Structures are given as structure tokens and as C-alpha cells.
Amino acid sequence: MTGIAHGSRLLAGPTSPDDRYAGRLRLGIDVRGGRSYVSEQYHERALRVLKPLRLDDSGQVVCTMVNPGGAYFGAETYDIDVTVTPGAALLLTTQSATKVYRTPQGPAHQNMRVVLGRGASLESVPDQLIVYRDGEYVQDTVIDMHPEASLLTAEIITPGWSPTGAEFAYSELRMRTEIRVHSEERPRRLAVDQLRIKPGEGSEISGVGFMEGHSHTGQLLLADQGLDEHFYEALCDIMDASRTLSGLTRVGIERRDGLKCWALRSLAHRTEDIQELHLAAANEARKRLRGQQPMNLRKY
């Protein structure tokens, strides 16, 4: 079904889906009486959202994206728009891992645009991205946020199984996330996080110089005015205790509006090791920044 959910009503969507996209999704999150809810929902083709959930009494709403097709294929483009209005809170996740199979027709693309209003918060914690043999994937995310909004995004990249046993059999992976800050002044770029993995370019695709012998990588971005030295030390302790090789970069320290952005990058030998690190970091952020209970998505 293609349609728009507005409040408790289902409104008809466009009569003919846009053939440029294999899947499109639009979400609008609003707040009423201290509780966030899905005020607008539109989907077409191979993207859906399950019934919204709540993990605690904070008022945050949880939305789970689903791809009924099971994977991204060559030359397909997926388009996602998310707007979280002032004071609303959204946790966005996926039902399962995103898989990219062979892409002989060209790379699979995902384009995502996010708008966060004043006092809004977004936690985007999808399951891992698995890129299989001869797969190519490009992801472009642009986030426009008010300086008093709060953001957490996390990504895990896992190499897919190959019949030859090669750890990196995919062709190329490119991911770019741009965070822009909007206020009464001129919009300004806060941070740009880019990742490019092209295994064939190195002579040693699993040794020093290429992920330091690790097979999995992850990145977590935090943007909030409440990021401080105590939180930094807590995250360093979490990283040191994890089964990952991780580093933390800080930007935006001198911004007049107080908004800061931290980027946590990790290497590991298993998806679960990065998942545990991201969950610990997210729970620390939930506790320190918003006084929320730990995240428990209860998927498995």
C-alpha cells in the first residue's frame, strides 16, 4: 500500500510512484502533551515503517524501517526524508540488516535528509550494513539541525560472505554524512564525516594500512550542546573496555551556540563487538543528555 498516515488517519498518496526510486519514505514526528507521535508517513515501493513503539515513559517514539524486498540491488535508489519538529523525539532503527548484493548495473544508493527543530532529538541506530561480493554502495546523508537539537547516528559495516572465503569481496563502499546547523544566523556546516572503502586499491587488503587487519568498521556521531569533558572521559572508558580499536574526534568546540559534534570510529573482528560499543555509548548519551533509560529494542 502507498499512502500517508496523518495522526490516526490514512491519506492517499500519489497515484503513480516515482520510477526514479526503488523505495521512498517520508516521516514527520510531532509532539503533543509531552509525547511524540508520527504525524506524517508516506511510503512507496520497497520501504515501509512498522507500527510505532515506545521504550520508556520519556515520550520518545520508536519507528522501525522495513525493506520487504530484503536487499538493495544494482542501480537502485532509496530516498528517505525525516522531520522531527521542535520538542519531539524519535528513535529510528531497522527491522534487520541492510544487505547489498551484486550490483553489475551500477551502485545502489541511499539518500537521506533529516531536519531537527529546536529541542528535537533523533537517535538513528540501524542494524548493520552487509555488502556482498561485487557489491557497490553509496550513502549520502544530510542533517539540518537547530543548535538546541540533539543527534546520535550509528553505522556498522560488515563484509558479506564470499564463496572464495575472501573477507573483502565487495567493489566499493562510500558513505557521507553532513551535519548543518540552522539558527537565526546564516546556516553553517558543523561536520562532514566520510568513509570510503575500495578493497582493490590496496596490495594488502587485510593487512596494515587497510583497516589494520580488521574486517568490520563502525562510526557513531554525536551532536549536542551537552557534550562535556565528563562525558568525554566516560566515552573513553567505554572505548577502552570494548573489544574494538576505536578513536574519538571532537569538533565544534569553539562555536558560540555551544553545539559540539563528536565522531567515534571503530574497527573490530565481529559485528557484535561494535554493536556493544555503540549501545554503551548511546545509553551513556541517553542518561547524561536526556535522563532516559537504556535502549532495549528487543529485536532478537
Image: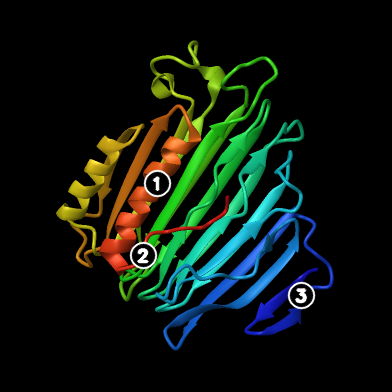
Label 1 neighbour load within 10 Å: few <14, some 14-19, many 20+: many
Q: Position of residue 207 (x, y in %)?
A: 43, 14
Name the amino acid, label 2: Gln
Q: Secondary structure at mark 3?
A: loop
Q: Which residue is depicted at the point 55% across and 42% down?
A: 128
Q: Position of residue 195 (x, y in %)?
A: 46, 37
The image quarter containing residue 129 is top right
Q: Secondary structure at mark 2?
A: loop
Q: Are marks 3 and 1 in contact (CB under 8 Å)?
A: no
The residue where tag 2 is placed is: 293
Q: Which residue is depicted at the point 39% across and 46% down?
A: 278
The residue where tag 3 is placed is: 13
The residue where tag 1 is placed is: 278
In the displayed structure image, the side of residue 124 where residue 189 appears, left or right? left
The image quarter containing residue 242 is top left
Q: How are the colours assigned in the image?
A: rainbow
Q: Is residue 246 above or below residue 176?
A: above
- Residue furthest to the bottom in view is 33
Q: Which residue is depicted at the point 59% across and 53% down?
A: 111
Q: Is residue 31 above or below residue 16?
A: below
> How far apart in space, not on screen, are marks 3 and 1 (Cα)?
36 Å
Name the amino acid, label 1: His
Name the amino acid, label 3: Gly
Count the labels in the image: 3
In the displayed structure image, the side of residue 98 where residue 145 appears, left or right? left
Q: Is residue 162 above or below residue 37?
A: above
